[in-house]
Image (cartoon, rainbow, N blue to C red):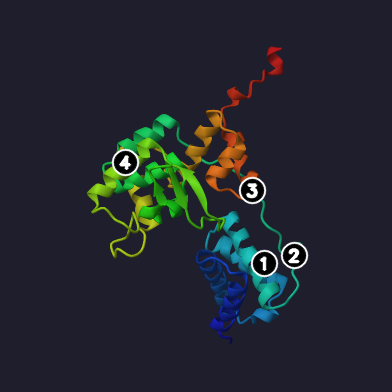
Amino acid sequence: MFNINDYLSKLEEFFELRNLADKTRENYLSSLNCYLSWLQENCILPEDATYEDIRSFLKYLKLSRGLTKQTINYYISKIRFFQIYVLNKPWNSYQVPFSKFDSKLPETLTHEEAIFFIKSLKNLRDKAICALMYGSGLRISEARKLRYDDISRVNNQIYIRQAKSRSDRYAILSKLTLEILTEYWQKYSKPKGLLFPNRDGINPISTQIITIHLKKHALNLGWNRNISTHIFRHSFALNLYNNGADLLTIQKLLGHKSITSTTIYVHLGNINQLNVTSPMDW
């Protein structure tokens, strides 16, 4: 009926013009490939797709594939991009509204829990990566791509290249993290390029491998907790906030573009540190 690759090729042209990151391109292509495949199966040309057709596709994602509201909103934004920039068609957000969903606070670890978890890891590589995520507030994508030259022992800082916001920054390097990194570096043949390479020695270790190892370790500890790689970054920021660090400092250390992303730690913070008294006790 139509060639999906013809439309994906047009997308690639816009990706080049907007200079989108590789991961962003991959996400767009995956989502829109799914949408175009559904249109093809239902004998609908992309140019002829109505708002009712788009809503039917979203119902398919919800009912047949069981996707969450957040994920469906993600698809809506990609289809909107496709309609406007590739098909040159208008977009009415009232016809395809974003779903409202409950906003849950992320799970975190206390300082004692984080240190215990890290120190009890037997695999030195996993221990080093966790120490970087909790000790420096790194994303797993940032930790796994670190290179030898990014670590500054003199200035006790880490150079983060092209983070999620596509901007470089410096992160703090704790003494304990440096000790763990040094031990790892010496044991793993003193790598001068990528600190955490995959088996091929060229690409960084995959996020999935680290995630599996951390979840397995949590089970071995008897923890009934959802231990993700991001829990260490959240815990880094929350424990800094509870210890008196201001939001602007935390924003800078995390590499958030907007302070809005950092204000979540106000909601997570210890309520007793607000120095307010309930009217019931006046």
In this figure, which residue is indicated by the disc labeled 3?
A: 258
Amino acid on which the number 3 mark rests in the picture: Ser
**Residue 218 in the image, given as x and y percentages of width and height:** 35, 40
Amino acid on which the number 4 mark rests in the picture: Ile
Q: Is residue 273 above or below residue 173?
A: above
Classify the position of the C terminus by image quarter.
top right
Image quadrant where residue 43 sits: bottom right
Estimate the spatial distance between the alpha carbons at disc 2 and disc 3, rounded to whole Å: 30 Å
How many marks can you see?
4
In this figure, which residue is indicated by the disc labeled 4?
A: 180
Label 2, secondary structure: give it. Answer: loop
- Mark earlier in primary sequence (4, 3): 4
- Mark earlier in primary sequence (4, 2): 2
- Mark earlier in primary sequence (2, 1): 1
Q: Nearer the viewer, residue 3 or 247?
A: 247
Say if mark 3 contacts mark 1, CB within 8 Å.
Answer: no
Estimate the spatial distance between the alpha carbons at disc 4 and disc 2, rounded to whole Å: 54 Å
How many residues crowd mark 1 within 10 Å: few (<14), some (14–19), many (20+)?
A: some
Residue plotted at (38% across, 50% down): 211
- Mark earlier in primary sequence (2, 3): 2
Residue plotted at (53% across, 59% down): 66
Classify the position of the N terminus by image quarter.
bottom right
Label 4, secondary structure: give it. Answer: helix
In this figure, which residue is indicated by the disc labeled 1?
A: 55
